[in-house]
Amino acid sequence: MKILVCISNVPDTTSKINFIEGDKEFDRKGIQFIINPNDEFGLTRAIWFQQKQGANVTVVSVGNASCEPTLRKCLAIGADRAFRVDLEPSDGFQVAQQLQAHCQNENYNLIIAGRESIDYNGSMVPGMLSALLGLNFVTNCVALEITENKAQASREIDGGIETISCGLPLVIGAQKGLVEEKDLIIPNMRGIMQARQKPLKVIPPTTSETRSEVIHYEKPAPRGEVKLVEANNLDQLIDLLQNEAKVI
Amino acid sequence: MAVLIYAESEKNLLKKSAFELASYGRAIADKKECDLIAVVFNLKDPSTLSEYGVNEVISFEDPTLSAFKAHEYGVHLTSTAQEMDVDLVVLSSSADAKYLAPILSVSLMAGYASNVVALPESYAPLTVNRTCYSNKAFNTTILNNEINIIGLSNNTFGAHKKSTPLNVKSGEISPSSGSFKIEKVEKVTGKVTIADADIVISGGRGLKGPENWHLIEDLADVLGAATACSKPVSDMGWRPHSEHVGQTGKPVATNLYIAVGVSGAIQHLAGINASKVKVVINNDPEAPFFKAADYGIVGDAFEVVPALIEKLKDLQNS
Ligand SMILES: Cc1cc2nc3c(=O)[nH]c(=O)nc-3n(C[C@H](O)[C@H](O)[C@H](O)COP(=O)(O)OP(=O)(O)OC[C@H]3O[C@@H](n4cnc5c(N)ncnc54)[C@H](O)[C@@H]3O)c2cc1C
């Protein structure tokens, strides 16, 4: 089984977000970049398939050289090889098209991408990629088993879980639940050393289009002070919620 | 030119988000002076949509469409959009809609912006405001395509009545193909889901253990609210993953979010920030949540919550 995991390089979850160039660009200064958490859940499941079912795991990222440390980390976690498509993408559609071009030469049985990135939050890449490739697709994927040429996948729906069966190849949008937090792999020294020897190939982008353009960023307006209510004066809280906030 | 919404329904009833989408779509259709079309699947009576500004319904009825299937629903939405000269599709932010949108954007060759929080800023080119960086920021996005898709954040626009004469047509069913099969659906019944709730009650590690969750559940019951939790609470298995909210869990955008024994870590706040009114109950006055909340009580959850439940019950009975 050949698995591809699509990796997005995103600001660490604790990052304070700031913008520069007249609020047109994200300020990368002092920001630590990490594997997008949803992608990491997917990668961890892929490594499980590698260890238990002999799968081969490739990771790919569309981005400039600054995402290479994140790809190296994926190799240290256990991926067998990495590709970087040398393009700083402007939107999710462009990423999906670049990935489509890569997948067309590779015959992956399973393609995993995070259900959304924590920076753009587009929820675009896995679904668009599946549609561009004409493959089955399950997003918000919280469980995945593969036997022979068949997949059983569970999808989190509003208020429950739906279980699907389908043939391969399959694209999934990964999220928490696919593996548990405790299953996440922290690379050890040996993994880090091995990762240096593993192939990380830079491939040129193909022609692609963008369908959206971000022209401006803004941070939420600073909020007012919290109104404190005494613990023994709950009538006041109820009154505020009823008559001031009008939410109950 | 026309605006199309996918009006979601369950068990023959329109979802709350359908009315919000209709209202949002109507506001745009008025601006563009065009029709507002709703597509529904296996819904017997779509007539209430006319109270929220929909003037045309395309109704697809077929046993193969009884459960949501992104690919099949996408095929029918695509054919409708193409036949009716639609240039803007509006979807909700439900799990199903977010599943469908990227597929639809490929089949319609459309641009797509998710998490949109307001009416478009302008229409030529289509310019929308959306959240990004997990609710830590907003961006302004231009969708300069012949067809575009807006994913509207739930609970941002609200439902507004506006009566419109309605024309209902049945749509032509395309046969489905492929190996994709829904094996089973497990749904919690009789419980408000985080996605649909007006009020969410969230519990954190401060509740000490799963045996104390009756506090959260009872408070949720009196308020008709959904229950949620912080990440460590679901990681420790105190609560199911589906209740984990925050940057790496579910986003929450309700009218009222009450956090009990939650410290207010940046990743937690990111996911719930879009909620309109936030209340924190925490015994540590230094907890960061107090900086993000509208109302706060410094106190012991084990005393405050039972007292609050009693007071709310009294209020309901009076
Ligand atoms: C990559 C990454 C992603 C993350 N994503 C998320 C996410 O999506 N969602 C999320 O929630 N977290 C997330 N976290 C975790 C986050 O950093 C915090 O660790 C977590 O939110 C803390 O959960 P908590 O508030 O329940 O627990 P704690 O931080 O332990 O807080 C417990 C609170 O309860 C209060 N308390 C204790 N006893 C009582 C009492 N008797 N009455 C009232 N209050 C009491 C304490 O004062 C304290 O403030 C993420 C972390 C990382 C590294």
Image: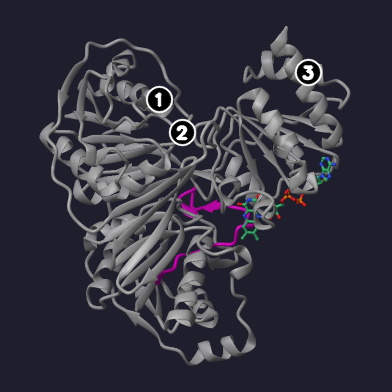
Q: What residue is rendered at 78% in x and 24% in y?
A: B308
- Locate residue A231 relative to residue B189 in the image: left or right: right
Q: Could you classify mark 2 by the number of other residues whose Cα lies within 10 Å: few (under 14), some (14-19), or many (20 or more)?
A: many
- Residues at discs 2 and 1 in contact (Cβ within 8 Å): yes
Residue where numbered disc 3 is placed: B311
Residue kind at label 1, given as amino acid type: Glu
Q: Earlier in the sequence, mark 2 or mark 1?
A: 1
- Please name whichever residue, B95 or A129, is drawn nearer the observer in this view of the structure: B95
Residue where numbered disc 1 is placed: B20
SS state under label 3: helix
- Please name whichever residue, A82 or B218, is drawn nearer the observer in this view of the structure: B218
SS state under label 1: helix
- Locate residue B100 relative to residue B263 in the image: left or right: left
Q: What residue is rendered at 68% in x and 15% in y?
A: A242
Q: What residue is rendered at 73% in x and 18% in y?
A: B312
Label 3 CB less than 8 angstroms from ligand 1? no
